[in-house]
Each structure stands twice: as structure tokens, then as C-alpha cells.
Amino acid sequence: VTFNFGEENRPERFEGKPKTPVTLISGFLGSGKTSLLKSLLENQDGARIGVVVNDVAAVNIDSQLVRRYESGTVEVTELQNGCVCCSSADDLFTAVQNIVMRSKDYPFQHIVVELSGVGEPQSVKKNWVIGLECAMPVALRTEVKRVVTVVDASTFASDWLDTRMAQERNEAVNHEAHAKKASAGILEDKSGAGLLEVGRLLAEQVEWADVVVVNKLDLASQDEVKATLDLVGVLNSKASICETEFGRASPSTVLPEVPMGLCIAESGSCDGYSWKQTPSELSVEMRIDAHTKAKDIDFKLTKK
């Protein structure tokens, strides 16, 4: 089977070019994924971040973030079916593609994808590999570089030992979500991922993580925190651990390193001049002698 996505998307055009790193945020329902995402948007450390979420309203983007969004610093895309898991790969690819293609001349340095509570990061990563083999434009321009799993320090260990409470929370949230979507005429995902045995899901989300965010320390006792850290260490000894309250974490701790080709300087200076640039404008300032005439000035600008 041969796929043709147009001349500008031929695979050889992307050889040697940097790819925008994609970070998957996973975690069981109520662990604090949305709080972590909101914290990353509020404290970007100067990075341009594209975001794919299940529900834009749930992120509760405040006016400050909206202003950043309007100026091109934050881009938010909401998935049509409200879920990111194995069966919705096409929808996820489309959402990420929309972000990438709208910022080709001034690319985002990170794309963050919030998975649903029952989302399986390994399935999304496999889909990206398949997309690259098929030369899909979004897979040529982006790469899944990091999986971040958020766990609730106050419930993770107990949910692991006895999954009944976690299953009840999952069913309660799913029942409410199903009712809302049914009333809006939205078809539900039929993958059956919500029926996945909770214990195995909790383990797999941690096992596939590069970073585990142990959240809600303010709600957990010392014994609960210790049990959670011990369990995370057993499930994934290679992952780095970030302990947080209210999902507050620095982007430098959670997100991967930005490829050098995507680090675009916004200002600088050299001998006799300084410059600033935006996605649509470049301005250069230099000192000119008061007696210099316009006809004696010759500007030659080149692009590297």
C-alpha cells in the first residue's frame, strides 16, 4: 500500500530536520492530570506549547492564558470524541496535525497530549510508529518523546491492593460523562477500554512512564506517600519521580529537552545593531550618523 500526502510531505524532505517532541500525560481518573496541564500552561518557562485535551472547558483557562493563546504562545485543540486511547488514533493525529500545520513558520517547542483516565500510552506510541511507517505528515513532523504518568499519592497504593474503590470511581465518572454526551448526541467510543481491569491499567500507566508525578501530597499521610513511592519504584525503577501538590510542576522537570532546531531566539544583538522577531515581523535597530543620507544606506538581509 502506498500513501501519497502531497509533494510537501514527502519523507525525504524531513530527513535531518528536528521533530517537535510530544509528551503524553496519563493517569487514572482524579489523579490530577488536568491540574498538571494547567500548571504547565501557567509556567511555560518561555516555551511555546501546543496542547491536545479531552475537554477545553475542564482546563479552565484563565484570562491570562487566553491572552497568551491569542498571541500565539498557547494553542489548544479539543478532540472531537472526547477521548484519547487506542481507537481514537485518527482523531489524535488530526488534532496534533492541526497544531503543527498552523505553526509551520514558528513551530511549537512542545506538544502535550492529555490522555483520558483509561488511556493507554503504549497504544498511542505504537500508533505513532505505524504513522511513521506510513509516512503520515504528523509522524514526520513530531515524535512521542516522553510519557508522564500522574498518580494520586493518597489512593494509588490502596487502589493497587484493592481495585474496587477505583473501579467505582471510574464507573461513576463514566456514567456521568456518558449521560452528558448522549444528551448532546455524541457517539461514545466503543473500544471497551473503560472495562480494562483497573489493577493492570494502573500498573501499565506507571510501567510506560518516563516521569511519574506523585501528586496530592497534601491529602496523603506519610504512610500513604511511602507506600506509593515504594510501589512506583517496584513497577518502574527507571522513571524519574516528581512529588507535587495541586499538580504544580516545572516544565523543565516534566517536559523533554527541546531540539536545537526548534529553539528560535526572539531577540539578539551584534556589532552596531540589535534585533527582535515575531512570527510575522523582524525589526532591526542600529545607530546611523546624523549626516548619513538615505541613498547611502544599502540593506542586504539574508535568511539562514
Image (spheres, grey):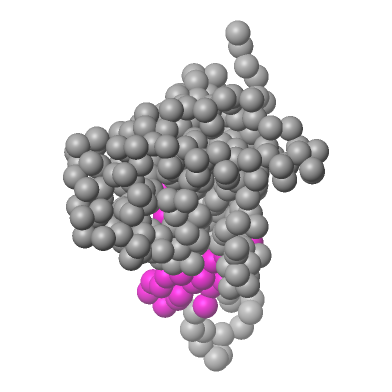
Q: Residue at x 62, y 16 (%)?
A: 3
User: Is residue 273 part of the magenta span, yes or no?
Assistant: yes
Q: Residue at x 54, y 31 (%)?
A: 194
Q: Is residue 133 left or right of residue 153?
A: right
Quadrant for the N terminus in the image: top right
Q: Depth check: 128 or 246 in front?
A: 246
Residue at the farthest top position = 1
User: Is residue 243 part of the magenta span, yes or no?
Assistant: no
On screen, residue 214 above or below 186: below
Residue at the farthest bottom position = 290
Q: Residue at x 43, y 51 (%)?
A: 31
Q: Is residue 247 left or right of residue 62?
A: left
Q: Which residues, given as a range, are shown in magenta?
A: 258-285
Q: Residue at x 26, y 60 (%)?
A: 221
Percent of width and height locating residue 278: 57, 65
The reply to whether residue 109 is visible in this rendering is no
On screen, residue 296 above or below 168: below
Q: Is residue 83 left or right of residue 263?
A: right
Percent of width and height locating residue 240: 24, 47
The reply to whether residue 35 is visible in this rendering is yes
Determine which quarter of the picture holds residue 57: bottom right
Q: Depth check: 193 or 207 in front?
A: 193
Q: What is the number of callouts on the image?
A: 0
Percent of width and height locating residue 196: 47, 27
On screen, residue 196 above or below 237: above
